[in-house]
Image (spheres, helix red, strand yellow):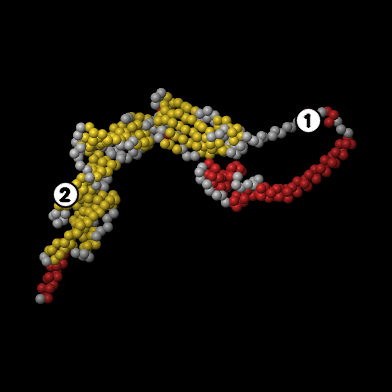
Amino acid sequence: MKNLGKIIIIFSLLVTSIYASVVAKVYPKSVVSGEMATYTLTIRGGEVNKPVISTICGNNVLGTSSQTSIQMINNDYKKSYVLSYQFMPQKSCVIAPVSVEIDGKIQHSNSVKVTVKPAVQDKNANFVLNLIASKTELFVGEPFTLKLILKQKKDAEAVDSKFIAPDFKGFWVKGESKATRSEAGDFIITKASYRLAPQREGNLTIPPAQLKIASRISSRDVWGSFMPQVKWKSYFSNTVHVKAKPLPNNAKIVGNFTISATADKTQITPNEAVNITVKVVGDGNLEDITSFKPYISGVNVFDEKINIKGNTLTQKLAFVADRNFTIPPFSLTFYNLKTKKVEKISTEPIHIKVIGAVKKSELNIKSASSVPAKALHVNNGVTAINSVWIALAFIVGLVLGIVIMLFIKPMKFFKNEKTFNLNDEKLLLIKLLPYKDKDEVVKKIVDILEANLYSSKKEKIDKKIVKELLKKYDIS
């Protein structure tokens, strides 16, 4: 009887080991690039420690599901688990075996191969996508139109749909139109378009657009019953190849443009800002246009970031000075596609008058030859007396100078520090600008002042720090 008990135990363990297994499958075994595949693990056994899988062949798991069933084998109930993992393979690969702990022992699944084929357009399908480029050979930065056309059979059913636009790597996306629908015979036609421009020279490729369509199907569950499901199928467009040529004559901009510059005023008070708006309108690679900020001696110039909307580029600049000045013309050089020439367009100079500007005084020095001869003819005695007085005046002047340096100047600074209006941000900015590049603290204060004066941003400055800076650099 004791031997019979041992035999039963050994037999039970053998049965458990026989039915403890992990089987891996992938469906479908061959997929088109951009389509979803499902990796399944069928696990049989008693106590199962389900594996944690987050990536398959280097691709993230996009969705998971599980089913559990119970079977009776030799009067013993056994569980069966079906774990499903959805992923989107980018290239063909072999899925390595997965380790699963079943009844305290490690079991390994089989390896599975999945084949990924390149996207191919099916012109006889229920859904047909086409990409049509207005030009396939053009210059770098030259705009062109890419049309997207979808032909759908009227009797084609779809529960849901997802459109995935092409990857426009290497192109500027300048605009996108809204989709329009119409009917033609047995088809529903949907059209949309993109406005693109190549960013660099060479052979560029626009990969296929993808349309994922969900339709209803019926399949059997683990108990053999039919159950409705949704199946996704992908439809692809053609690939578009574009050849981008370098611009002639070393030009950087291509297209056809107009340029203008407007000032909010032409008369200002000292240290008041003049706001200029530069506008470029036209069809071309506006994205490659750099800042129009000029250099003007004695004038502080502040430029905002260039803004591009549609076929219009705008940039705002601010000019601050304490004397009259002229803003030079703003110019743009580009290759004109119509005339096939490099052209240059410019605005008119803008003259700014500063009311109350401080004029620089001129030092008028007369030579000795311009002094009358009578003034040079003096008595020797008078000359000696004058020499004594001159020496005495020099000594008194020296003493007074030392007193001024040691006492009067600090008092004067103290007085200026009291009367300096720290709320006058424009004047404060002008005073601190010369020290911006050699003092980080000054630079931070200047940045805050510029933002407060020439943008919508308003930030309080630390007046205690400002007072220390004024004292440090003897600013009055």
- Numbered disc in front, either 2 or 1: 2
What residue type is disc 1 on?
A: Ala
Residue beneath the point at 51% across and 42% down: 455
Q: Looking at this view, is 304 or 168 the one in front?
A: 304
What residue type is disc 2 on?
A: Ser
**Is residue 328 something that shows in the picture?**
yes
Q: State how many labels appear.
A: 2
Residue beneath the point at 45% across and 26% down: 343
Instruction: Looking at this view, name the residue that lies furthest to the bottom.
Output: 1
Q: Position of residue 248 (x, y in %)?
A: 41, 27
Task: Decide which of tag 2 and tag 1 comes sooner along the chain.
Answer: 2
Residue identifier under label 2 = 218
Q: Position of residue 66 (x, y in %)?
A: 22, 56
Quarter of the rendering occupied by the C terminus:
top right
In the picture, the disc for residue 409 is none
| Element under disc 1 | helix
| Element under disc 2 | strand
Whether the residues at callouts 2 and 1 have beta carbons within 8 Å, the answer is no
Residue identifier under label 1 = 368
Q: In the image, is 30 to the left or to the right of 332?
A: left
Q: Position of residue 437 (x, y in %)?
A: 56, 44
Relative vertical location of residue 319 with respect to residue 447 in this rendering, above or below: above
Relative vertical location of residue 263 with respect to residue 49 in this rendering, above or below: above
**Is residue 473 something that shows in the picture?**
no
Q: In the image, is 69 to the left or to the right of 267?
A: left
Q: Position of residue 391 (x, y in %)?
A: 82, 42
Image quadrant in which you'd find residue 153: top left
Q: Residues within 10 Å of mark 1 (few under 14, many from 20)?
A: few
Residue beneath the point at 53% across and 48% down: 459
